[in-house]
Amino acid sequence: MALLEATGIAKRFGGVTALDGVDFAVERGEVMALVGDNGAGKSTLIKVLAGAHLPDRGEVRMRGEPLELRSPQDAWKAGIATIFQELALAGKMNVQDNIFLGREPCRRVLGIPFLQRRAMRREAERLLASLEVEIRDTRLPVENLSGGQRQGIAIARALHIDADLIIMDEPTAALAVAEVRKVFAFVRSLREQGKAVILISHNIQDVFEISDRITVLRQGRIEGVCTTTATDPSAIVGLITGAGHASSRRGPEHASLPAQP
Amino acid sequence: MLKWTRERPVLWILAVMLILGAILSFLSPFFLTVPNLTNLLKQVSILGLLAAGQTLVIISRGIDLSVASILALCAVVMGGLMSQMGLPPGVALPVGIALGGLVGAINGLVIVKTGIPPFIATLGMMGIARGLALVYTQGVSFQLSSPTLIWIGEGTFLGLPIPIYIVLLVYAVLYLLLNHNSFGRNVYAIGDNEEASLLAGINVDRHKILLYTISGVCAGIAAVVLISRLSSAPPNVAQAAELQAIAAVIIGGTSFSGGIGTVESTLIGAMIMTMITNGLNILGVSSFWQQVFVGVIIILAVWLDKLKGR
């Protein structure tokens, strides 16, 4: 049984069909890369899995149990943590506030919840240390930090949830080489712990380095699911652009059409 | 600039206030006297209360232009309940404060459900609430004579006027809410990055409705202080006080672009505005000039804040 199984997911925004009946599954202990061109539906799909978008049709199952994902909280409770691109940090807020945003630890005094600031700071420092992210002071606003540090904070957020499935949207975009190494080391350690990772990336080289399987989305549909060791970058690029098997599928009368950019 | 002003922005604005106080006491021997300072604390109370709720709204990247009109509506309803219906203050005042909260909640609901920008929604409410106050009273002012109101308006406790305790209580509650509660963290996050707040699972709509409700409640509490000081409830009271409240918030260093600000700085911002008015009165400067000074101070305060950030 797959850890996460999504079947027949469809989502429209006005007249635009973002997802058109997508079936998608991830196994335990697997790194699944999700690739596709801009507008292929990757972000919409992970937002559905993260509880940020409600799909028009389709079902999401976790460990065989059907899920109702109406908010990001529902996804966390089901054990799905999502690391969105940079936009998901509040720049003027400090490191620890960002790590705990939306689920701050509180202690009730006379029924009134008070923030546990010291515990937040300690836990934030512990999480960042475990990721080898060096931040001088967790009370600094995150907009003053480097891309790698910010990515570290986003990952620490996901770690704090202790999820079984971690979704990462472009985790290595805008990172220096050494920082990319760190993110990959972290992904591998998650896999060793038996957790599943969904990784969205534009960088085919990265995808081949880290993933076990690759799902290709094109124009809101699944174009193919490949085992990474059994395919090669040019085949994946062919699937992404739709050029790979255009002649065999569309027939000779369409073969002369230019491939989609 | 100096490191401590960046880590504790409230110290910066506090220093500005103390310098202003020093200048005023140098210019006039009457400024630093007990009766004048007592008067100052009474004067700051209404502005301070309006600015308190406004601070939270502006931190969330909103604005509430309707606070002065809500104050007027609450004032006449409290006045009407007491003078026309003979209800005791113990009933009329809480009902009036609750009305302020209700009007604020309507502001929040309109903003959240229709997507109309807060500026427009509360501009509309500014007219509606003021108009309703005039309709309800037919433009006349209710005269009030209740020992409770006189005690609030004129009484003192430990030598300080009663309104200042009300102000301190409201600010203490809002301070705790902003700094020691997840509600406050969420308010900053919404003002800073609404998209990120949604993705973090924060119920942004519910928070916004609550924020405008808090602002309305603050206006209702300000109405209590106002009718106590005037012993009447005129419907045309506190015209343009919303702009003064916004000015106090801005002088206190709260950012219009959201995500930054504290209530304690707003209280000092309100003190600075009141000290300018009070000081110019003592010095015998025409009240026409006072508006000019306040305008200059607002621009200076924001400019200095920008310099400080570099």
Image: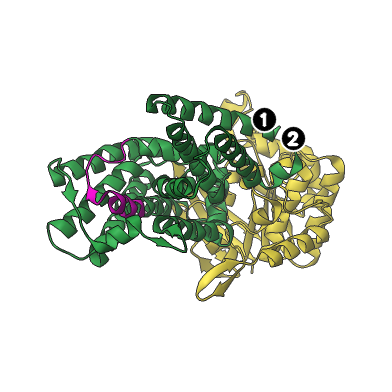
Chain colours: A yellow, B green
Residue A216 visible in this rendered orientation of the protein: no
Residue positioned most to the right: A178
* Location of residue B74 in the rendering, given as x and y in whole percent from the top left corner: 26, 51
- Work out which quarter of the rendered image holds the C terminus of chain A and state it: top right
Q: Is residue A246 magenta?
A: no
**Mark found first going from the N terminus, 1 or 2:** 2
Residue B282 visible in this rendered orientation of the protein: yes
Q: What range is drawn magenta here?
A: B221-239
Q: Residue at x 33, y 45 (%)?
A: B110
* Residue nearer the viewer, B201 or A30: B201
Tell me whether circle 1 and circle 2 mark residues in contact (CB < 8 Å): yes
For disc 1, the chain is B
Disc 1 target residue: B307
Work out whether A255 lies above or below A56: above
Q: CA distance from mark 1 to mark 2?
A: 8 Å
Residue positioned most to the bottom: A110
Q: Residue at x 52, y 51 (%)?
A: B187
Q: Is residue B85 left or right of residue B67?
A: left
Work out whether A82 lies above or below B3: below
Task: Identify the element where label 2 is drawn.
Answer: loop
Disc 2 target residue: B1
